[in-house]
Amino acid sequence: QVHLVESGGGWVQAGGSLRLSCATSGINFKLYRMAWGRQAPGKQRELVAQITSDGTTNYTDSVQGRFTISRDNKYSRLYLQMTSLRPEDTAVYYCNVPSRGFWGRGTQVTVAS
C-alpha cells in the first residue's frame, strides 16, 4: 500500500520561508518522477514543482525562483523549500506521484500579508 505523508506546513508572514517534507512508503521511490501540488480555496489543484528520478526539476512560473524541490532517494523523501512566500501561496500542499496518480493528504500553508 502506498503512503505519502506531508509535513512542515504552517502559518508564516509574507516574505517568510517554510520547508515541506513528504515521507513515502510502498513505492520504489528512486524510480519515480515526483511532484508537489497545491490547492487554494475555490481553485483547482495545480502542480507547482516536479523532479525526475535523475534530479531534473521544473516549476510553474508563479513559484520559479522562490521554491526548490529536492529528493532524498536513500530515505524515500521529497522536499519543497519555499522562500519569499506570498499570500497567494496560501493553499493545501500535496505530495504526488504523477505517473501513478497517488496523492498525500496534504499540509496547510497559510501566508499572512
Image (cartoon, rainbow, N blue to C red):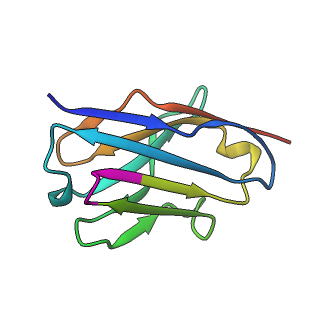
- 78 in relation to 23, above or below: below
- How many numbered markers are drawn? 0
Q: Quadrant of the C terminus?
A: top right
Answer whether residue 77 is magenta in the image.
yes
User: In this rendering, would 57 be left or right of 110?
Assistant: left
- Write down the quadrant of residue 8 in the picture: top right
Q: In the image, is residue 66 part of the stretch drawn in magenta?
A: no
For residue 44, side relative to residue 18 (left or right): left
Please tell me which residue lies in front, 58 or 79.
79
**Residue that appears at 29% across and 53% down:** 75
**Stretch in magenta:** 73-78
| Magenta stretch: helix, strand or loop mostly | loop
- Residue at the location (52% across, 46% down)? 20
Give the image quarter of residue 43: top right
Residue 7 in the image: above or below residue 72: above
**Residue 58, percent across and down?**
41, 68
* Horizontal relation, residue 15 to residue 76: left or right: right
- Using the image as rendered, state which of residue 97 and residue 2 is in the foreground: 2
The residue shown at (27%, 65%) is: 52
Q: Quadrant of residue 26?
A: top left
Residue sitting farthest toward the front: 74
Q: Residue at x 60, y 59 (%)?
A: 62
Question: Which residue is outermost to the right?
Answer: 113
- Image quadrant holding the N terminus, namely top left
Residue 59: x and y in percent read 47, 64
Residue 105 position, x and y percent, is 40, 26
Question: Residue 100, position in %: x, y?
Answer: 17, 42
